[in-house]
Amino acid sequence: MKKLLCALLTLAMLLSLAAFPAVAEDAAEINIFISQPEYADAMNTLIAAYKEVAPNVTINYETTQNDYPTLLKARINAGTTPDIFSTTSGKEIADYAEYSYNIANEPAAKAMDPAVATMMTYGDGEIHGFALKGNYFGLIYNKGIFDEVGITVPKTIDEFEAACEKLAAAGYQPVTTGFAEWWVYKHIMQHFVDAASDNAEALVGSFQKGEAHIKDYPVLYDNFFRFIDLCVKYGDNKPLETDLAGEDSAFGTGKAAMMVGQGAWVEADVLAIDDSIQIGFAGYPVTDNPAQSQIIGGSDQALRINKDSKNLQAVLDFVNWWYTSEYGQNWFCDVAGVIPPVTGAKVADMQIIKQGVELSAADGTAPLSICYSSDSYHQAKGEALQAYIGGSLTKDECCAQIEAKCVELDGTK
Amino acid sequence: MERKPVSPMSRKALKDTLIFTAPAVIMVLLAMYIPFVMSGYYSLTEWNGISRNPVFIGFENFKTIFSSGSPEFVNALLFTFKYAALFIVFSNVFALALAVALSRKFRLANFLRGMFFLPYIMSMTIVGFIWKFIFTQGFEKLFEITGWSIWNYSWLGDGNLAFWSIVLVGVWQSLGFYIVLYVAGLQAIPTDVLEAASIDGANARQRFFRVILPLLGPSITTCMFMSLTNSLKVFDIILALTKGGPGGATYSATLDIYREAFQNNNYGLGSAKAIVFFVIVLILTQVVLKVFERREVEQ
């Protein structure tokens, strides 16, 4: 009797390990694993809306921020590549190209904004990614404080230094920097890289080949480092401890007048601290030429479709619906509050986004040059700059380390 | 030599042994030995962790490590050894002191022992985030209240201070574990030996150094060994507190291996570093074990 009971129990435990999903006719399952957790609520709304369009399709949505690249690599190597996953646009398109599907002939690609599509290309006219949002990068400032102290937006480095002095004299902290985060540096430096050359992509390429040196480009060697030094001098008390939350808090509470290294994505968090704040948006002061102070627009994140997905057609249907249906196109503005990556969709009523659209029409946008390098290099560059700020590397040592890392991590082997 | 006939009894015992140990052996095989061998294979390749086919390059990765092509690894090793030395000293000394204090019979002894053990059962990541908050915003508030400059230092933003912050949090978190081991060791000391010592005129200090400490030999060996291995493997506390920053000043060996494999997309070199580190840890622990065992035998 006992033996029978034991045998039955063991059998039950073994059976519970095996899963028997009930598969209905033309039911499909889509696994989404992406890394933009700030849009989790918006994504869930989108998925719920799609359920009404295609009730037989179940979408499993997972997201994380920490260690996303590591987790993604673990899944790819385990053979459980998600149907939709994220990478950065530009250089990482090629890294993951053997796993992603070419959507150039899909309606979604035709609906995509051309500025976004250029960063998703691979090889000969193939498009390997689509975007959750367009983005704007630039200098964020508090209009109220600027009016009170009586300064205009600085467009040259000298104007920037003068503005900082005036703000400090008036009792405000001129800048908040977030220098504890490695990605703040890439967002700032790309403006200087764009100003240093007419062809930013070629410039970055020559660094990757080890042919270029920072010393040869005064915009980088002098202006960029001067900007960093000014930010440290007029910035947070403990610059290497301030992270994104610290920046949001310093700017949102009205303590700091300017916020660097950020873009359109911080508006919601800042308004959550103080919804009466008047946010100003501008290009960085990179040189003596005010015309070169431009914002940068584009999508630095790419969503990719797994080309070996078991339910490829279902995934494509979902993405096409997302980009071309009326609900999908309005979702970007109404639900997610982002800049739509599709042409012709309406723009969200957010301060930074509206100013971004105006500025790009008036002054043009500089290229999204962070995408010409991999995030591995950007992280190493961030570390080198942190060491420079902390004082353990001199300026020349810092430049040498940045150049060496560019070749080591992004150079073609 | 005549062969002993294998009796049915011992064959059954053998079969039982194999069946009962099989699950554990299989688990260890899957979780440790097979990945170790795979790591050895990957250390001979160049692979970015993404593409389907790693490229075989022989011992190139090891050459890179040993020919100063990887200064970060050397720095990370030095950091790890510094951390391990301080961790072992602080955690053992404080744990022993607290264990002696807590093994006396007073009313709150059990409760206090539980309190000291609490940090150890908390997840390292949570501990890291709580201390990050304390170091940045807690200290800022304390500085506003008291004005002491110690609260105003950049505990996580300055490369040298960040090292001490990590040592502090690491020791704080594992103290409970070593206290428990030492309390158990102290309670195993027969009281008549201590009575005999005090009758012979030994004062408290002499009792401690001449009687208690030698009798704690096995506990000390265990705690030394555990603190050595745990401190050499330090990873999650650094990840939660500083992520290796600021400016790469707080990378331990394991964190550097992680960075090489997953951040720099150089899985082959990361695996090679892991193998080298494994050999270093093996040698260190064997040496320490031999030294302490010999000490025990001599007594």
Image (spheres, coloured by chain):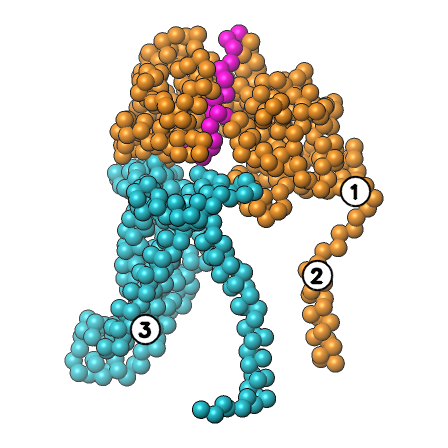
B39 lies above or below A283: below
The picture places residue B237, in percent across and down from the top left corner, at 40, 49
Residue A27 — which label?
A: 1
Mark 3 residue element:
helix
Q: Hey, what amino acid is under mark 2?
A: Ser
Q: In the visual, does B156 lie left or right of B195?
A: right
The magenta stretch is: A362-379
Q: Please rate how many residues cluster around mark 2, counting C-alpha atoms within 10 Å: few if below 14, some from 14 to 19, many from 20.
A: few
Q: Do the residues labelled 2 and 3 touch (CB within 8 Å)?
A: no
Q: Please rate how many residues cluster around mark 1, counting C-alpha atoms within 10 Å: few if below 14, some from 14 to 19, many from 20.
A: some
Q: Name the residue under label 3.
A: B218
Q: In the visual, does A189 lie left or right of B193?
A: right
Residue A16 — which label?
A: 2
**What hue represents chain A?**
orange
Q: Please state which of residues B244 and B71 is positioned toward the viewer in this rendering.
A: B71
Mark 2 residue element:
helix
A345 lies above or below B99: above
Q: In the visual, does A335 lie left or right of A217?
A: right
Q: Is A372 part of what is drawn in magenta?
A: yes
Residue A285 — which label?
A: none
Q: Which residue is drawn at 79% across and 51% down?
A: A22
**What hue represents chain B?**
cyan
